[in-house]
Amino acid sequence: MRPIPVASAPVTAHSATKKIDEPVAPCGACRQVMVEVEQQSKQPLRVLCQGETGPVMVFDGIESLMPFIFLDKFL
Ligand SMILES: [Zn+2]
């Protein structure tokens, strides 16, 4: 099966105890998955971060969220 290119990844969170009204950052594990998706797609991944409400932060390319990334060429 041929992989489907992924152009963007939304990141958000929900809390049962409080309202999240600021952008939510992806955890380290999610960032590494985004690196691998970006490598497979051979195009920058646009990451959109938002809480339940409030502003959206946009990052073009995972390297802007995660410098000195671990790449498959190191394997
Ligand atoms: Zn995560």
Image (cartoon, grey):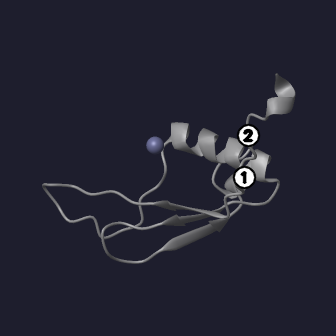
Between the residue at mark 1 and the residue at mark 2, the CA separation in whole angstroms equals 7 Å
Give the residue at x 42% y 77%: 55
Q: In the image, residue 16 lies at what x, y percent?
A: 15, 55
In the image, what residue occupies the spot 70% across and 54% down?
Answer: 4
| Total labels drawn | 2
Percent x, y for residue 39?
78, 46
Residue that badge 2 annotates: 69
Residue 23: which numbered mark, if any?
Answer: none
Residue furthest out toward the top: 75
Left or right: where 23 falls relative to 40: left
Residue shown at 53%/36% (left/top)?
29
Q: Residues within 10 Å of mark 2 (few under 14, many from 20)?
A: few
Determine if the C-beta at disc 1 is less than 8 A from ligand 1. Answer: no
The three-letter amino acid code for the residue at tag 1 is Glu
Q: Which mark is residue 63?
A: 1
Q: In terms of depth relative to the viewer, which is nearer, 65 or 47?
A: 47
- Circles 1, 2 touching at the beta carbon (< 8 Å): yes
Q: Quadrant of the N terminus?
A: top right
Type of amino acid under label 2: Ile
